[in-house]
Image (cartoon, rainbow, N blue to C red):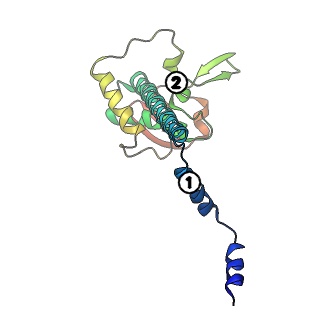
């Protein structure tokens, strides 16, 4: 095989995108006017840093808002219940978030309303959200509700209700409970799947 044939064969090969990119980068490095390229790179780096910082701040605020909604739900729905009952209410809320039948955020689940044809009005999923004025959460019960919300939201509490998404107080007998599977009775609440 002659050198001309060998050279012709090697030069006719396809150039991979990686080697093409590398050659372009080497060309840019050896050009005399690097300042515009360095400025463009620095600008891209600043923009990327700004965007990631904003994303971090927005996601941190969103998590804070979600935790607050979950803590409010635990506080108003179960603050007089035993600790297991408070965890159960938080767990039901998170099970609803995980279910395709309910909204996908904690705040949307907590404040969800649906039209009730019998009462001819919107009815809330959690009764405390229907009140115009609720007392401001405070004290030891509020701190406990916040701790429970953090533990359940971040998965530090082992689930005990096996997918329960519904509950009611023991002193009422709603018609929807007849077709549901009973999961547990904790304190003054009965939980269903």
Local packing at callout 2 (Cα closer than 10 Å; few below 14, some 14-19, many 20+) is some
For residue 25, which numbered disc appears in the image? Answer: 1
Q: Distance between the residues labelled 1 and 2?
A: 60 Å
Dot 1 alpha-carbon crowd within 10 angstroms: few under 14, some 14 to 19, many 20 or more: few
| Residue on which disc 2 sits | 126
Q: Residue at x 59, y 61 (%)?
A: 18
Which residue sits at x=55%, y=44%? 181
Residues marked 1 and 2 touching at CB (< 8 Å): no
In the image, taking residue 174 as reference, residue 121 lies left or right, namely right
State left or right for residue 144 relative to residue 69.
Answer: left
Residue 40 on image: x %, y % = 54, 38
Residue 128: x and y, percent? Answer: 48, 18
- Which tag is nearer the camera, tag 1 or tag 2? 1
Report which quarter residue 189 is drawn in.
top left
**Secondary structure found at label 2:** loop
Q: Horizontally, is 70 left or right of 108 in the view?
A: left
Which residue is the extreme one toward the bottom? Answer: 1
| Percent position of residue 155, x then y | 40, 43
> Which residue is at a point 57% across and 35% down the rendered structure image?
104
Residue 113's mark? none
**Residue 90 appears at what percent x and percent y?**
43, 34
- Could you tell me which quadrant the C terminus lies in? top right
Residue occupying image coordinates x 32% and y 33%? 83
- Secondary structure under the numbered disc 1 in the rendered image: helix
Give the position of the N terminus as an image quadrant: bottom right
Q: Using the rendered image of the protein, determine whether residue 165 is visible from the camera's viewpoint.
A: no
Of 178 and 87, the residue lying toward us:
87
Closer to the camera, 65 or 6? 6
Between residue 183 and residue 62, name the one nearer to us: 62
Q: Which of the marked residues, 1 or 2, is nearer the chain's N terminus?
A: 1
The reply to whether residue 107 is visible in this rendering is yes
Name the residue furthest front: 32
């Amino acid at each position: 095989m002659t050198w001309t044939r060998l050279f012709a064969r090697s030069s006719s090969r396809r150039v991979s995108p990686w080697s093409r990119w590398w050659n372009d980068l080497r060309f840019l490095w050896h050009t005399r006017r690097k300042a515009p390229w360095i400025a463009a790179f620095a600008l891209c780096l600043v923009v990327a840093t700004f965007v990631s910082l904003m994303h971090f701040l927005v996601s941190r605020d969103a998590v804070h808002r979600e935790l607050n909604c979950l803590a409010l739900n635990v506080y108003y729905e179960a603050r007089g219940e035993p600790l297991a009952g408070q965890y159960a209410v938080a767990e039901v809320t998170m099970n609803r978030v995980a279910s395709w039948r309910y909204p996908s955020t904690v705040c949307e689940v907590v404040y969800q309303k649906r039209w009730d044809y019998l009462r001819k009005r919107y009815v809330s999923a959690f009764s405390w959200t229907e009140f115009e004025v609720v007392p401001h959460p405070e004290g030891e019960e509020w701190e406990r509700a916040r701790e429970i919300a953090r533990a359940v939201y971040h998965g530090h509490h082992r689930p005990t209700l096996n997918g329960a998404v519904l509950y009611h107080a023991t002193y009422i007998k709603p018609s929807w409970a007849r077709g549901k599977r009973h999961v547990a009775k904790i304190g003054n609440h009965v939980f269903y799947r």
